[in-house]
Image (spheres, rainbow, N blue to C red):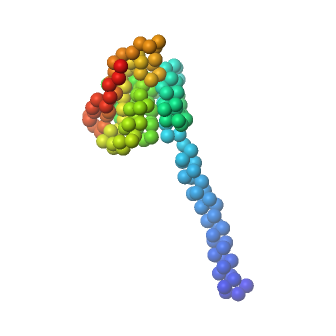
Amino acid sequence: MDGIDRRMFLAGAGALAFAPGAALAQARPQAQAQQPRIVMWKDPNCGCCGGWAEHAQAAFRERVQIVPDADMQALKRARRIPEDLWSCHTSMVHGYLAEGHVPAADLQRLIESQNRQVRGLAVPGMPLGSPGMEAGGRRQRYQVIAFGPGTRRSVFATHG
Protein backbone atom coordinates (compact mmCIF):
# COMPACT_ATOMS: atom_id res chain seq x y z
CA MET A 1 0.00 0.00 0.00
CA ASP A 2 1.31 3.41 -0.82
CA GLY A 3 0.76 6.38 1.56
CA ILE A 4 -2.50 7.56 0.01
CA ASP A 5 -4.08 4.12 -0.10
CA ARG A 6 -3.09 3.46 3.52
CA ARG A 7 -4.62 6.76 4.68
CA MET A 8 -7.83 6.01 2.78
CA PHE A 9 -7.92 2.52 4.30
CA LEU A 10 -7.38 3.85 7.82
CA ALA A 11 -9.99 6.60 7.35
CA GLY A 12 -12.48 4.01 6.09
CA ALA A 13 -11.72 1.66 8.99
CA GLY A 14 -12.16 4.53 11.44
CA ALA A 15 -15.52 5.38 9.92
CA LEU A 16 -16.57 1.74 10.23
CA ALA A 17 -15.54 1.72 13.87
CA PHE A 18 -17.92 4.63 14.55
CA ALA A 19 -20.70 3.40 12.26
CA PRO A 20 -22.47 1.22 14.87
CA GLY A 21 -22.55 4.15 17.28
CA ALA A 22 -23.82 6.44 14.54
CA ALA A 23 -26.53 3.98 13.61
CA LEU A 24 -27.51 3.70 17.29
CA ALA A 25 -27.59 7.49 17.64
CA GLN A 26 -29.87 7.73 14.62
CA ALA A 27 -32.17 5.04 16.04
CA ARG A 28 -32.58 6.84 19.39
CA PRO A 29 -34.70 9.76 18.13
CA GLN A 30 -37.05 7.29 16.46
CA ALA A 31 -37.33 5.26 19.67
CA GLN A 32 -37.98 8.44 21.66
CA ALA A 33 -40.63 9.54 19.19
CA GLN A 34 -42.40 6.22 19.73
CA GLN A 35 -42.44 6.62 23.52
CA PRO A 36 -45.97 7.41 24.73
CA ARG A 37 -46.53 11.08 25.45
CA ILE A 38 -49.32 10.20 27.87
CA VAL A 39 -48.52 8.08 30.92
CA MET A 40 -51.04 7.40 33.68
CA TRP A 41 -50.05 6.00 37.07
CA LYS A 42 -52.89 4.37 39.00
CA ASP A 43 -53.54 2.19 41.99
CA PRO A 44 -53.82 -1.41 40.71
CA ASN A 45 -57.25 -1.73 42.40
CA CYS A 46 -58.85 1.43 40.97
CA GLY A 47 -61.54 0.86 38.35
CA CYS A 48 -62.43 4.40 37.25
CA CYS A 49 -58.98 5.29 35.97
CA GLY A 50 -59.44 3.17 32.85
CA GLY A 51 -62.38 5.37 31.86
CA TRP A 52 -60.19 8.46 32.01
CA ALA A 53 -57.49 6.70 29.96
CA GLU A 54 -60.06 5.85 27.26
CA HIS A 55 -61.25 9.48 27.27
CA ALA A 56 -57.67 10.80 26.87
CA GLN A 57 -56.78 8.23 24.23
CA ALA A 58 -59.83 9.16 22.12
CA ALA A 59 -59.24 12.92 22.48
CA PHE A 60 -55.49 12.88 21.80
CA ARG A 61 -55.64 9.98 19.31
CA GLU A 62 -52.64 8.35 20.87
CA ARG A 63 -51.89 5.51 23.24
CA VAL A 64 -52.04 6.03 27.00
CA GLN A 65 -49.43 4.00 28.84
CA ILE A 66 -51.01 2.75 32.10
CA VAL A 67 -48.61 2.03 34.94
CA PRO A 68 -49.98 0.32 38.08
CA ASP A 69 -48.38 1.75 41.23
CA ALA A 70 -49.30 0.55 44.70
CA ASP A 71 -47.78 3.63 46.39
CA MET A 72 -49.58 6.52 44.75
CA GLN A 73 -48.93 8.84 47.71
CA ALA A 74 -45.17 8.58 47.22
CA LEU A 75 -45.57 9.14 43.48
CA LYS A 76 -47.67 12.29 44.03
CA ARG A 77 -45.23 13.63 46.62
CA ALA A 78 -42.27 12.99 44.30
CA ARG A 79 -44.01 15.01 41.59
CA ARG A 80 -44.80 17.80 44.09
CA ILE A 81 -48.56 17.70 43.54
CA PRO A 82 -50.24 19.66 46.36
CA GLU A 83 -51.95 17.19 48.68
CA ASP A 84 -55.28 19.02 48.68
CA LEU A 85 -55.46 18.50 44.88
CA TRP A 86 -54.91 14.72 44.96
CA SER A 87 -57.26 12.36 43.18
CA CYS A 88 -57.13 8.68 42.26
CA HIS A 89 -54.58 8.76 39.42
CA THR A 90 -51.73 10.92 38.18
CA SER A 91 -50.77 11.42 34.55
CA MET A 92 -48.09 13.11 32.49
CA VAL A 93 -49.60 14.51 29.30
CA HIS A 94 -47.26 16.09 26.77
CA GLY A 95 -45.01 17.40 29.55
CA TYR A 96 -47.76 18.57 31.92
CA LEU A 97 -49.09 16.83 35.03
CA ALA A 98 -52.77 15.87 35.15
CA GLU A 99 -54.09 14.91 38.57
CA GLY A 100 -57.37 13.04 38.49
CA HIS A 101 -60.24 13.26 36.03
CA VAL A 102 -59.10 16.31 34.05
CA PRO A 103 -61.04 16.78 30.80
CA ALA A 104 -58.85 16.29 27.73
CA ALA A 105 -60.11 19.55 26.21
CA ASP A 106 -58.65 21.46 29.17
CA LEU A 107 -55.34 19.65 28.80
CA GLN A 108 -55.30 20.40 25.07
CA ARG A 109 -55.89 24.09 25.78
CA LEU A 110 -53.01 24.13 28.28
CA ILE A 111 -50.67 22.32 25.88
CA GLU A 112 -51.51 24.74 23.06
CA SER A 113 -50.83 27.72 25.35
CA GLN A 114 -47.36 26.35 26.20
CA ASN A 115 -47.69 28.08 29.57
CA ARG A 116 -44.62 27.02 31.55
CA GLN A 117 -45.86 28.86 34.66
CA VAL A 118 -48.32 25.95 35.01
CA ARG A 119 -46.95 22.53 35.98
CA GLY A 120 -50.27 20.79 35.66
CA LEU A 121 -54.04 20.63 36.03
CA ALA A 122 -55.96 18.89 38.79
CA VAL A 123 -59.52 17.81 39.48
CA PRO A 124 -59.48 17.07 43.22
CA GLY A 125 -61.55 14.14 44.38
CA MET A 126 -63.68 12.19 41.94
CA PRO A 127 -66.64 14.35 40.87
CA LEU A 128 -69.55 12.64 39.11
CA GLY A 129 -69.70 13.52 35.44
CA SER A 130 -65.98 14.16 35.03
CA PRO A 131 -64.20 12.00 32.40
CA GLY A 132 -64.13 8.44 33.68
CA MET A 133 -66.67 9.21 36.41
CA GLU A 134 -69.80 9.20 34.25
CA ALA A 135 -72.71 7.92 36.33
CA GLY A 136 -75.90 7.61 34.32
CA GLY A 137 -76.06 11.29 33.41
CA ARG A 138 -75.58 12.57 36.97
CA ARG A 139 -73.15 15.48 37.10
CA GLN A 140 -71.54 17.47 39.86
CA ARG A 141 -70.15 20.94 39.37
CA TYR A 142 -66.35 20.86 39.61
CA GLN A 143 -63.33 23.01 38.95
CA VAL A 144 -60.10 22.25 37.13
CA ILE A 145 -57.26 23.82 39.08
CA ALA A 146 -54.02 24.94 37.42
CA PHE A 147 -51.03 24.61 39.72
CA GLY A 148 -47.54 25.94 39.29
CA PRO A 149 -44.33 26.27 41.18
CA GLY A 150 -44.65 26.67 44.93
CA THR A 151 -48.20 27.43 46.00
CA ARG A 152 -49.28 29.17 42.79
CA ARG A 153 -52.70 28.00 41.56
CA SER A 154 -55.81 29.29 39.82
CA VAL A 155 -59.15 28.04 38.48
CA PHE A 156 -58.49 26.92 34.91
CA ALA A 157 -62.05 25.80 34.07
CA THR A 158 -65.42 25.03 35.65
CA HIS A 159 -67.65 22.15 34.51
CA GLY A 160 -71.07 20.72 35.34
Determine the residue positioned at 35% across, 23% down. 159
Compare residues 79 and 116 and report the one nearer the observer: 116
Q: Is residue 29 visible?
A: yes
Q: Is residue 78 visible?
A: no
Q: Quick check: 131 above or below 19?
A: above
| Side of 45 relative to 101 (left or right) | right
Image location of residue 85, percent across then percent down = 34, 26
Q: Quick check: 66 above or below 117?
A: above
Image location of residue 58, percent across then percent down = 52, 31
Compare residues 66 and 157 and report the one nearer the observer: 157
Kindly indicate the quadrant of the structure image that contains residue 156.
top left
Identify the residue at the far right of this view. Answer: 1
Give the mark count: 0
Image location of residue 27, percent across then percent down = 60, 54
Q: Quadrant of the N terminus?
A: bottom right
Determine the residue positioned at 35% across, 42% down. 113
Determine the residue positioned at 41% across, 36% down. 108
Q: Quadrant of the C terminus?
A: top left
Determine the residue positioned at 68% across, 77% down. 9
Compare residues 146 and 106 and report the one nearer the observer: 106
Image location of residue 150, percent across then percent down = 28, 37
Identify the residue at the far bottom of this view. Answer: 2
